[in-house]
Amino acid sequence: MKYNPKSDFDRKKAQLYFDKLMSGTTPFEVTSLKKRSSSQNAILHVFLSYLGLELGYTLDYVKLNIWKMKWLRTTFYVEDFNKKTGIAYHRVRSSKELTKEEMSHAIGVLIEKASSECGVIFPNEKSQSFDDDFLLMQNEIYKAEKYL
C-alpha cells in the first residue's frame, strides 16, 4: 500500500496498518517509494512520441524496440524468477519501476542517442525556450496522433 506522509489521514491509516503487521507473525517488508516525477513522465512520453513521429514509428515501437531494447537494454531487460517454480526468466521492465535517478539517466540516454543516431534534437530543459519548444512538439504529436 502507498501512503503520503504529508497527509494526516494517510499517516493514521499507515500507522494502523503497521500496528496490524507488527501484531502478526508473518514477516513483512517496509520500503520507501522513489518514483519518477510527473514532469519526467510527461517529458519522456512527448520525447518518445516525437522521436516516433520523426522516424515513422509508433510510440509503442520506439519505446520498446529502440529506447528499452536497443539503447537501454541493461536497464530494462532483466532476469527475474517465478516465485512458485523458482525458474528464471527474462522480462522487460516497465518504466514505472524506475526510480527518479534511473529515469533521469534513461531520459538522458534518449536525448543523446536520438541526437547522435537519429538526428533528432530535443529541447534542453534548462533553456528559456523549453516551454515553447515543448508545446510545439506536443502540437506536432497531436496533429499526427492517429498515426502514432
Image (cartoon, rainbow, N blue to C red):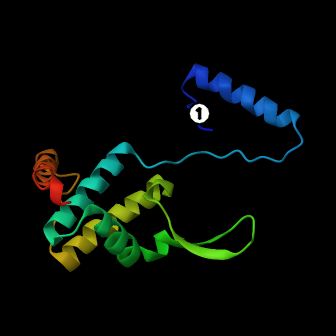
Residue 100 placement (x, y as % from top left): 45, 53
Dot 1 crowding, Cα within 10 Å, few <14, some 14–19, many 20+? some
Q: Quadrant of residue 58?
A: bottom left
Q: Which quarter of the rendering shows the N terminus? A: top right
Residue 19 placement (x, y as % from top left): 79, 30
Residue visible at 26% across and 66% down in the picture: 111
Q: Is residue 68 above or below residue 35?
A: below
Residue 136 placement (x, y as % from top left): 10, 50
What kind of residue is marked 1? Tyr
The residue nearer to you, when weighing 46 against 59, is 59
Number of numbered discs visible in the structure rendering: 1
Q: Quadrant of residue 66?
A: bottom left
Q: Quadrant of residue 30?
A: top right
Residue visible at 72% across and 64% down in the picture: 83
Horizontal arrangement in the rendering, residue 55 relative to residue 35 (left or right): left
The residue nearer to you, when weighing 17 against 148, is 148
Q: Which quarter of the rendering shows the C terminus? A: bottom left
The residue nearer to you, when weighing 147 against 9, is 147
Q: Which residue is mark 1?
A: 3
Question: What secondary structure is marked by label 1?
Answer: loop
Residue 45 placement (x, y as % from top left): 29, 55
In the displayed image of the protein, which residue is found farthest to the top?
8
Residue visible at 37% across and 69% down in the picture: 64
Q: Is residue 8 above or below residue 1?
A: above
Horizontal arrangement in the rendering, residue 148 relative to residue 2 (left or right): left
In the displayed image of the protein, which residue is found farthest to the right?
25
